[in-house]
Image (tube, grey):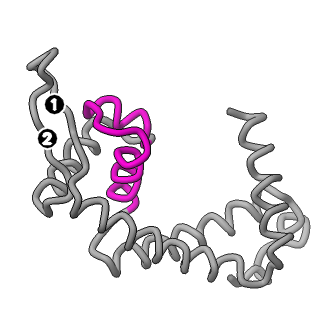
Amino acid sequence: METSGAPRRLRGTASWLLGQATTHAARLVSEALGAMGSRRYHYSLLAALDEFGPASQAELGRRGGLDRSDVVATVNELEQKGFVERRPDPGDRRRNIVTVTPSGVAHLRRLDRVLGQAQESLLAPLSPAEREELVRMLNAVLEHHG
């Protein structure tokens, strides 16, 4: 990523560097998921369903960090592809419970592989120990502000 046009004092700040790295990471992830016919929201919802089990659309939004309107659109897309099923909640028929299908789990595994490749590309200049340290430090910053 070209940084020579930015002032030196800006290039030396963690916030600017994180922003630049985030832009590059988002592009790599978007391209990787796009090559599989998916988006970040697809991955977020499938991963939440795989990890936590069936959930209401509102709960999926909270788990995946998505707005309710984005959840509905994303669930619609995933349902059309056969990756999730949506059924009325037997305890409250006003809401739906979303479940990942076997096809959705298989798609999630493929997405895991391409995201792993995107991570490898992003972190290529770092050693395994440096990658671990970077993740540890970023988690510390996020925990402090979260």
**Residue 71 position by quadrant:** top left
Please indicate whether residue 146 sits to the left or right of residue 51 in the image: right
The circle drawn on residue 86 is 2
Task: Give the class, few, some or many, for how many residues have Cα within 10 Å of label 1's Cα (few <14, many ≥20).
Answer: some
Q: Is residue 53 magenta?
A: yes
For the residue marked with disc 2, what is the amino acid? Arg
Please indicate whether residue 108 sits to the left or right of residue 24 in the image: left
Q: Quadrant of the C terminus?
A: top right
Q: CA distance from mark 1 to mark 2?
A: 6 Å
**Where residue 142 appears, x then y in whole percent?**
72, 42
Along the viewing direction, whichever of 70 and 107 lies nearer the viewer = 107
Q: Quadrant of the N terminus?
A: bottom right
Q: Residue furthest front?
A: 102
Find out whether the residues at labels 1 and 2 contact each other: C-beta distance under 8 Å. yes
Q: Taking 85 as reference, is 128 above or below it?
A: below
**Where residue 103 appears, x then y in whole percent?**
21, 63
**Residue 119 position by quadrant:** bottom right
Q: Taking 39 as reference, is 128 above or below it?
A: below
Q: Which residue is mark 1?
A: 96
Along the viewing direction, whichever of 20 and 79 lies nearer the viewer = 79
For the residue marked with disc 1, what is the amino acid? Asn
Magenta span of residues = 40-64
